[in-house]
């Protein structure tokens, strides 16, 4: 294989580099009509234009040179940079719990790719120990890269692989499992694993970070420590998401995999339990339970791995004036299940009725969830609701739309008998539908209100 | 048996040995002898509507108690692009600080606290930065790359400053030499520190994110006064555009100093230009002292590679009469005695006026181990806090030799390990070099350790922003409306024969344009106009309460009014204090308020014969100068504004 001397350069800028025989990582003098510049030629991001050459100048800054201004170039040296997290062997401490960390990609353990400028996954116990040495005080760590994909590229194949890997680890008698995961679909995976890995004897903790670990203020290290503590020392043998509670760097919250949702595109405290309180709060070395009803850690290995997933399930986000052909097209395309995300208590307009009837007749399973995110579907309150139920749409209680999609996909991977599908959908595995919503399960405070302002000033939110 | 040791004598002797002279006594030969070298990093806030990477308003400040929310962060070091941890990063990590931010909704948003990615770079700020780069004769880049510069002290919630180079390799012309510029960057300003106690540091986020340029010079200055002059020139240059902020904190500078064989040390955030000479002078000599310490230690200690500190815990094995130590023992705070092998006479070695080598250790302990003062005593204090006998006992407990020095410190258990490492690290550096540091400045011209000086290793490309191309046409377009060079302005002031002591005021307040207009458009005598601005206006500014509406245009309008009314310009001296306080008052009212009456020239001159006779009658000696002075005194009030005082004097003389 030939070495790429011009990483990321293309078109005209590549031409200029070749013309003057200057390589990426070469130290270069560049003469331009704007005066001379000198520095190390850096790789260029593939998505950037072909009109500039990037160099790192002596003071450590990067600058771009407009190739139209270049009158000459000379390579005076060459030094290739190797980016490496200092890798040290993860120490084994007798008496500490054994925790397995599964890597799936995402920003929990990552580094920069200087060609694309993007954050790419990087991961090994040694690297993690180099970056977060505190982990060695919490547990004895073993890691395994199951696959490396960005959160948005997770899919059925990955879900099944992950469930099976977890099953194997539990079989091996691990004390706890942590899964490093990108945050965008962290809550989808939380639900998937709840359904696929039933009755686990140990904690299964999903963790990510909202600020990649290449940033000093990253939440990755804290999240990882909290997750490791929960997995190794905690008593909750459920699938949970462990992420920052407040945006402040003070504690993490443990959310049930079926009740959690990413609620802000960039905040650290983006994950919230919906319609209930989180299961517990975790700070390094301390776990405070919020909920009394949880599944405790056990000594046995009686886990049930149910690794099925049907990818012919889709979601339909209702909007006023939606046309029936949106459903017809889905049916025609072969979808076997549709999660409708309806308005208010679970409504769609009348125009859709014929299409719903046609879909039902073709055996498509349809369930109703809510755009309001919080609250229960109540299809008995208005006629429209009763009409729809009569036409085959089944209300999903307070199941979150994404969880309903995950669950129906999982069920349809096992059966397509309508009665069985309905029974399974409405029988909660772990609180995806709850009997009651506590009054503190819905909290979206509004700024400006004096009492709220006072709270924000006093409490690290 | 211990040798008798006199700390003060040792301090004075070492000061003499290294050849320290005070700044007032120092000559260029002294600076050449120690190889004085200095350069600057001049920071200047830009006058923009918004912050650099978000749409928060710029320039809204909150007071200490006025904040809406508080958040907490911790900072961890990360690797740089070239795969290394930066020294500062590791030091800040050791301090284990809890960083607290006070946010005000009026001045900060979720971007400021790193909960939202950056928005597009402020175009207004970019334009100003390019204009100033033109003025600074820099080679302007073809594409601005936003770089992350790590700051783990917490002064920026992200842990890095987003900054981009606009130009490199420029030059500014001082009257007698050229100073080369390394670069100019556009960056976001940092938080203002509220407090830093123990492991908790508090910041306000109002200043955070404001657009700022940093002009960095080569270390071309060879004496403290050149540094100050360079600083003034850069400041004047920035202000000459009228596009930068003024006022407290809007301009700050870091001064880089070294001596021959020394290291680059950055004196951070020098608040006043006039502090620069004393600070740079002392820093160069501090480094010169440290090099002397190195020489002494290398002779005293045979196996430097084996040099280690040795320590014991004093709790339970040592009793002191000293109340501080007694209290520490009582409260069960760990008290550690440390032996510094071969350091006798080194701890009290001169470093800065009133400071010795022991301070170097003490200051690092405060910052890195987060100990709270008082936390340390040592065997060579100017005024011993614990008795000689007690030191002798400590010496025995440490099994110390006659050429050793000792220190005792106390603090929380968790901080002891870091403290011991810090002591050893600083002592080992003494054998080897002047450590690269950033130091905090004080008005008396001394400095203290602030942090390890970061290197180029703390730079990362910002993955949240894409490069911003700068078209050649756009760059050239911006060149069109930049003001004249500062050196050209200075030369013009000289040509006008305006007194030199007015230059700083005229240039720093950016009154040059006003001055030029008064001279060329209103045909006022340049010397009078220059002195009026550089002396009179400056005096008024310092002695009267300013009204917000006051500005240069009012000064111009006042002179235009005087010219139109055919009144003498000297009246301006009396009008300006009134206008300064009441800028909206119309000029006639100003005249009334200072009691001015229009009197025809002839009428004033008609008094001359009478006054002359009067003088002849009453004066003891009929001296011509006395005559002129007396009559001028009598007529001054009514003459002022109606006839130029010079002309009046001529009349008195000629009428003689």
Image (cartoon, rainbow, N blue to C red):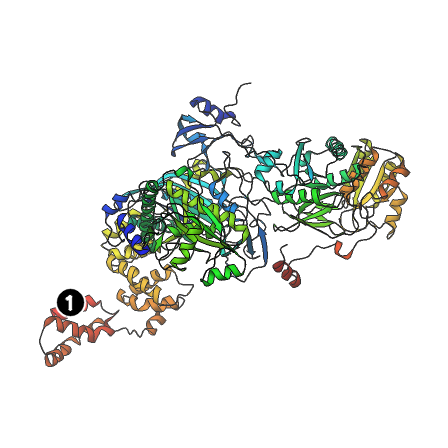
Q: Identify which residue is drawn at 54% across, 60% down.
A: B331
Q: Quadrant of residue B142?
A: top left
Of residues B20 and B567, which is closer to you in this image? Answer: B20
Q: Is residue A413 above or below residue B220?
A: above
Q: Secondary structure at mark 1?
A: helix
Q: Is residue B189 visible from the viewing direction of this image?
A: no
Q: Identify which residue is drawn at 32% across, 68% down.
A: B575
Report the residue marked by disc 1.
Answer: B650
Give the farthest residue toward the front. B1
Decide if residue B278 is on the left or right side of residue B185. left
x then y, percent, for residue A444: 70, 54
Q: Is residue A228 above or below residue B550?
A: above
Give the farthest residue toward the left. B622
Q: Is residue B68 visible from the viewing direction of this image?
A: yes
x then y, percent, for residue B100: 55, 54
Classify mark 1: residues with Cα within 10 Å, few (<14), some (14-19) or many (20+). Answer: few
Decide if residue A5 is on the left or right side of residue A222. left
x then y, percent, for residue B134: 38, 42
């Amino acid at each position: 294989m030939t070495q790429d001397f011009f990483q990321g350069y293309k078109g005209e800028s590549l031409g200029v580099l070749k013309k003057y025989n200057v390589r990426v990582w070469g130290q270069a003098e560049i003469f331009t009509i704007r005066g001379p510049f000198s520095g190390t030629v850096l790789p260029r991001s593939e998505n950037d234009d072909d009109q500039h050459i990037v160099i790192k100048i002596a003071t450590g800054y990067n600058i771009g040179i407009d190739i139209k201004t270049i009158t000459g170039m000379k390579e005076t040296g060459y030094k290739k940079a190797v980016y490496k997290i200092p890798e040290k062997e993860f120490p084994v401490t007798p008496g500490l719990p054994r925790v397995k960390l599964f890597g799936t990609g995402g920003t929990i353990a990552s580094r920069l790719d200087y060609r694309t400028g993007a954050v790419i996954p990087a991961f090994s116990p040694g690297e993690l120990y180099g970056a977060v040495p505190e982990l060695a005080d919490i547990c004895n760590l073993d890691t395994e890269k199951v696959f490396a994909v960005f959160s948005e590229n997770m899919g059925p194949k990955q879900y099944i692989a992950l469930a099976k890997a977890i099953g194997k680890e539990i079989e091996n008698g691990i004390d706890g499992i942590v899964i490093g995961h990108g945050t965008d679909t962290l809550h989808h995976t939380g639900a998937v694993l709840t359904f696929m890995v039933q009755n686990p004897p140990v904690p299964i903790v999903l963790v990510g970070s909202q600020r990649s670990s290449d940033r000093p203020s990253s939440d990755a290290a804290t999240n990882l420590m909290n997750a490791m503590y929960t997995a190794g020392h905690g008593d909750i043998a459920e699938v949970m998401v462990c992420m920052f509670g407040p945006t402040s760097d003070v504690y993490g919250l443990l959310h049930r995999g079926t009740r959690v949702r990413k609620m802000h595109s960039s905040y650290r405290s983006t994950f919230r339990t919906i319609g209930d309180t989180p299961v517990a709060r975790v700070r390094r070395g301390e776990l405070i339970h919020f909920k009394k009803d949880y599944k405790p850690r056990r000594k046995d290995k009686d886990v049930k791995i149910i690794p099925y997933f049907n990818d012919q399930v889709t979601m339909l986000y209702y909007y006023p004036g939606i046309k029936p052909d949106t459903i017809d097209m889905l049916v025609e395309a072969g979808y076997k299940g549709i999660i409708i995300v309806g308005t208010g208590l679970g409504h769609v307009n009348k125009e859709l009725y014929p299409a719903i009837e046609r879909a039902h007749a073709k055996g498509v399973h349809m369930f109703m969830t809510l755009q309001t995110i919080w609250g229960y579907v109540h299809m008995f309150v208005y006629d429209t609701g009763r009409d729809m139920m009569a036409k085959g749409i089944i209300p999903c209680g307070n199941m979150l739309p994404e969880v309903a999609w995950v669950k129906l996909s999982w069920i349809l991977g096992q059966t397509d008998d309508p009665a069985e599908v309905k029974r399974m959908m409405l029988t909660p595995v772990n609180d995806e539908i709850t009997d009651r919503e506590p009054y503190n399960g819905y909290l979206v405070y509004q700024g400006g209100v004096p009492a709220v302002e006072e709270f924000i000033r006093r409490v690290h939110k | 048996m211990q040798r008798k040791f006199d700390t003060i004598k040792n301090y004075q002797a070492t000061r003499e040995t290294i050849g320290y002279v005070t700044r007032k006594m120092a000559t260029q030969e002294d600076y050449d002898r120690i190889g004085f070298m200095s350069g600057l990093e001049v920071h200047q806030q830009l006058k923009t509507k918004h912050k650099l990477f978000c749409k928060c308003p710029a320039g809204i400040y909150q007071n200490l108690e006025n904040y809406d929310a508080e958040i907490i962060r911790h900072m961890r070091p990360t690797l740089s692009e070239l795969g290394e941890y930066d020294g500062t990063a590791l030091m800040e990590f050791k301090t284990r600080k809890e960083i607290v931010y006070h946010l005000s909704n009026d001045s900060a948003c979720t971007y400021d606290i790193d909960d939202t990615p950056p928005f597009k770079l402020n175009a207004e700020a970019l334009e100003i930065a390019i204009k100033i780069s033109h003025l600074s004769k820099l080679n302007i880049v073809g594409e601005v790359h936003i770089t992350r510069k790590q700051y783990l002290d917490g002064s920026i919630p992200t842990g890095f400053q987003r900054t981009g180079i606009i130009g490199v390799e420029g030059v500014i012309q001082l009257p007698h030499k050229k100073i080369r510029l390394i670069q100019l960057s556009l960056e976001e300003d940092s938080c203002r520190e509220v407090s830093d106690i123990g492991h908790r540091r508090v910041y306000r986020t109002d200043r955070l994110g404001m657009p700022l340029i940093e002009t960095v010079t080569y270390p071309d200055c060879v004496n403290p006064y050149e540094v100050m002059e360079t600083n003034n020139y850069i400041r004047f240059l920035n202000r000459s555009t009228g596009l930068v902020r003024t006022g407290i904190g809007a301009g700050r500078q870091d001064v880089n100093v070294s001596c021959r064989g020394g290291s680059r040390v950055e004196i951070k955030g020098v608040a006043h230009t006039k502090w620069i000479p004393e600070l740079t002078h002392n820093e160069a000599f501090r480094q010169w002292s440290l090099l002397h310490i190195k020489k002494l230690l290398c002779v005293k200690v045979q196996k430097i590679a084996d040099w280690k500190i040795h320590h014991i815990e004093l709790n339970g094995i040592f009793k002191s009469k000293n109340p501080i130590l007694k209290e520490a023992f009582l409260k069960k705070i760990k008290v550690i005695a440390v032996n510094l092998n071969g350091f006798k006479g080194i701890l009290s070695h001169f470093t800065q006026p009133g400071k010795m080598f022991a301070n170097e250790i003490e200051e690092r302990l405060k910052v890195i181990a987060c100990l709270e003062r008082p936390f340390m005593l040592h065997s060579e204090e100017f005024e011993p806090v614990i008795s000689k006998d007690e030191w002798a006992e400590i010496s025995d407990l440490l099994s110390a030799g006659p050429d050793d020095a000792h220190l005792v410190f106390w603090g929380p258990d968790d901080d002891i390990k870091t403290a011991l490492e810090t002591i050893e690290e600083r002592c080992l550096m003494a054998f080897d070099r002047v450590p690269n540091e950033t130091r905090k400045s004080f008005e008396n011209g001394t400095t203290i350790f602030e942090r390890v000086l970061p290197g180029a290793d703390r730079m990362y490309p910002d993955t949240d922003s894409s490069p911003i191309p700068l078209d050649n046409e756009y760059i050239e377009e911006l060149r069109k409306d930049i003001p004249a060079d500062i050196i050209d302005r200075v030369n013009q002031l000289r040509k006008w024969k305006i007194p030199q002591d007015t230059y700083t005021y005229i240039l720093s307040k950016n009154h040059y344009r006003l001055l030029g207009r008064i001279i060329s458009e209103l045909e006022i005598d340049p010397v009078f106009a220059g002195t009026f601005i550089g002396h009179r206006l400056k005096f008024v500014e310092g002695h009267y309460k300013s009204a917000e509406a006051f500005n240069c245009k009012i000064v111009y309008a006042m002179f235009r009014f005087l010219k139109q009314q055919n009144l003498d310009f000297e009246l301006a001296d009396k009008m300006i204090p009134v206008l300064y306080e009441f800028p909206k008052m119309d000029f006639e009212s100003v005249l009334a308020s200072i009691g001015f009456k229009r009197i025809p020239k002839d009428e004033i001159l008609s008094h001359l014969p009478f006054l002359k006779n009067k003088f002849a009658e009453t004066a003891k000696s009929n001296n011509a100068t006395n005559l002129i002075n007396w009559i001028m005194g009598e007529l001054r009030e009514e003459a002022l504004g109606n006839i130029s005082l010079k002309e009046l004097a001529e009349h008195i003389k000629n009428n003689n």
